[in-house]
Every structure is written in structure tokens, then in C-alpha cells.
Amino acid sequence: MSEVVQGPWSDRQLAEGEEKAKPVQLPRGIAGGGGGPHDPGMEARIAVLEQIAKDTRDSIADLRGIRGDIQGFRKGVADEIRDLRRDARSDYRWLLGIMLGGFAALL
């Protein structure tokens, strides 16, 4: 008989668009319970750890995609700041020229 394994992480709140992880289904014959030096529930815990590793790998792949988006956004912001600084220098030069011209006209 197969056994369904869930852990305390199954009750956590999901992010928007995130799907709830499916419970781990142990194959027949790995229900544990045999004697020996190992804990009888070890197979179930290993199956849960394997599921956690898979979910972690998927989450890391999603984070890498988000990181690429952030880097593109950061480059766009840096370009905008560079353009604003160039425009501010140009405006300052015009203002200085007008002030000097006005001062020279008064003399």
C-alpha cells in the first residue's frame, strides 16, 4: 500500500501564481517498517527531502529569471539617470549664459 507524505511546509502561504506542491506518493514496497539499524520512517523522510530538493531547484530557476529582469531594469534606470545628468548640465550652462548675458547688458 502506498503512503502519502506531507510536512509542516505544506501549510505555508503561497505566493501569487504559485501552485501548491503535490504530496509525495511513496511507491509500493518502500512503506518502511522493516527492522534493522535504520529508523522505519526513513524512506518517507527521504522522499520528502527529494521533493523539497525538486521544489527548491524550481524556485532557484524562477529567481534566476527574476534576476535577469532586475538587471535589465537596473540598466534602464542607469541610462535614464545618465540622460538626466546630461540634461541638467546643459540646462545649467544655458542658465549661466543667460545670467552672464544679462549682467553684461546691465553694464
Image (cartoon, grey):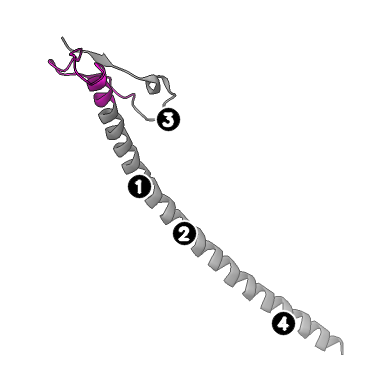
Amino acid carrying mark 2 in the image: Gly
Amino acid carrying mark 4 in the image: Gly
Question: Neighbour class for label 3 at 10 Å: few (<14), some, many (≥20)?
Answer: few
Q: How many marks?
A: 4
> Above or below — where is 77 with respect to 10?
below
Element marked by disc 2: helix
Element marked by disc 1: helix
Q: CA distance from mark 4 to mark 1?
A: 50 Å
Q: CA distance from mark 1 to mark 2?
A: 19 Å
| Residue drawn at the location 43% of the way across and 51% of the way down | 70
Q: Which residue is mark 4?
A: 97
Q: CA distance from mark 2 to mark 3?
A: 27 Å
| Residue drawn at the location 62% of the way across and 75% of the way down | 90
Apparent side of residue 15 relative to residue 5 in the rendered image (left or right): right
Q: Position of residue 1 (x, y in %)?
A: 15, 9
Amino acid carrying mark 1 in the image: Arg
Question: Tag 1 or tag 4, which sits nearer the N-term?
Answer: 1
Magenta stretch: give its range. Answer: 20-48
Nearer the observer, disc 4 or disc 3? 3
Q: Residue furthest top?
A: 1
Question: Tag 4 or tag 2, which sits nearer the N-term?
Answer: 2
Element marked by disc 3: loop
Q: Position of residue 38 (x, y in %)?
A: 23, 21
Please identify the quadrant where the C terminus is shown. bottom right
Q: Which residue is mark 2?
A: 76
For residue 22, which quarter of the picture? top left
